[in-house]
Image (spheres, rainbow, N blue to C red):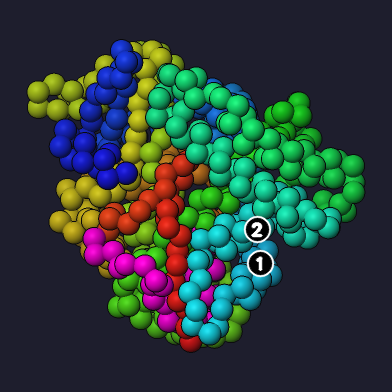
Amino acid sequence: MNLFTFHFRDCGTTLEQKFLRTIAFGTTDPENLEAMMTNTNELGFGLWRNIFFPFPAEGISTQDGDAWKHSRELLRPQLSRQKYRTLKVFRAHVDSLLRQIPTDGTEVDLRPLFFRLTLETTAEFLFGKSISGMKPGQFSKGEKFARGFDNAQSYVIQRFRLLDLYWLISGPEFWLSCGPVHHFTEEIIEAQTGDKLEMSEKNEHCIFDSIAQDASTRDSLRGQLLNALLAGRDTTACLLSWTFFCLAQHPDVLGLLNAAIAAIVGSGDNMTQDSLKKMSYLDKVLKDVLRLYPSVPVNTSTAHRTTILLNGGGKDRNKPVLVRKGQNVAFCVYAMHRREDLYGPDAHLFRPERWAENLPLYRDEKTAMWGYLPFNGGPRVCLGQDLALVEAAYTVVRILQRFPRVRLGDCPRVENIAEERQKVTLVLSLSDGCRVVLGR
């Protein structure tokens, strides 16, 4: 991702790329991003359907037009705050995670634990029961699903980098990596529709029935479920991993966060959404983690018709940019979130206190609204934004209540943000894991 940041810093906030006669654009300009995310009739995610296929070929993340609007209307009520108002949907799964953390001061890699946690909680929201709570042997199949899921994403991101030439990466390895993903999803669908798992009536969180009743084909049902699993598992797991990676290297921030937790909820598991909201410093911590490490660091739109980007053209870079029908525009929130003219000269540093300051970001209403986009914005804003933040906040608090001391494990300290090894698939994660030592 540093390469993206370098190019935008060197060439300006909007640039043109040429690759094998294919012209595409990239931007980190808030005004351009506003236009891209609000003018859904002109710019959409049409290319993504082809890039994803056959991973999840059809679903809210790859849809445009009426199909996309319908999916949002279908899913919006299912992700209401009322569905997780008591936080009990997370409690048992976080309890399980805590039992897997060693108490003898040995190193633990939190990343796989977080990915397992969020797979379990997302499955419970979707199907009414977690993966491990399903029939015997299902959890081990869930592990195979997770590996296939990760492998398929690696191929998808390679196809994404080629844009219109995505078809150059379509070998049997990609299709084979999708196999365990589709097979696992089909097994769950069979179990649900065959009433082998009696959960839909009993669990208020289950949204499978609504999706199943609406789906016109088996492929569309599988696609929607896989889109939901991708959004629910990967993004929150990455946020948690990056949060503990940052806390392990900033004991001052960790100390302030522990003090806030002790003052508001103490050591008991009596948290509510209201008590989480009162932890303003925790909110700032998560906000700065998402600024530096947005779960989806780069994305792209395709022009449905010839249109313009408002800024980035001409010698002074202040003129419109012509985008012809079929051309692609990448938007890189990772690079935008590190702009010094938006976040100050220390934009490259993890410093939660910045969110209580008068940042350049706040110079006008439009920049403030569109210069920070960890969950997209406008009509395309992530429906699960609040769910992800609540789950992340609850998990962070529960872990720090049990283990208030966090330090890096047997790995070198990263002196400068972005020097750590990053893994970019559809999300941004730690390449070497989140290896830390937790203590009391």
Q: Is residue 43 above or below residue 34?
A: above
Residue in view at x 82 percent, y 51 percent:
200
Residue 414 lies in the magenta stretch: yes
Query: Mark 2 belongs to which amino acid?
Result: Thr
Residue in view at x 60 percent, y 43 percent:
149
Q: Is residue 86 above or below residue 344?
A: below
Q: Is residue 372 above or below residue 351?
A: above
Q: Which segment did they paint magenta? A: 389-416
Residue at the extreme right: 195
Q: Secondary structure at mark 1?
A: helix
Residue underneath mark 2: 121
Name the foreground residue: 63 vs 422: 422
Query: Mark 1 belongs to which amino acid?
Result: His
Horizontal side of residue 220 vs 391, given as left or right: right
Q: Are marks 1 and 2 in contact (CB under 8 Å)?
A: yes
Residue 288 can be seen in this image: yes
Horizontal side of residue 377 vs 110, given as left or right: left
Residue in view at x 27 percent, y 45 percent:
2
User: Circle 2: is it few (<14), some (14-19), or many (20+) Cα within 10 Å?
Assistant: many
Name the foreground residue: 105 vs 206: 105
Measure the alpha-carbon separation of dots 1 and 2.
7 Å
- Spot occupied by residue 44 in the image (x, y as percentages of width and height): 46, 25
Name the foreground residue: 390 vs 20: 20
Residue underneath mark 1: 93
Horizontal side of residue 68 vs 21, given as left or right: right
- Spot occupied by residue 354 in the image (x, y as percentages of width and height): 25, 63
Horizontal side of residue 242 vs 191, given as left or right: left
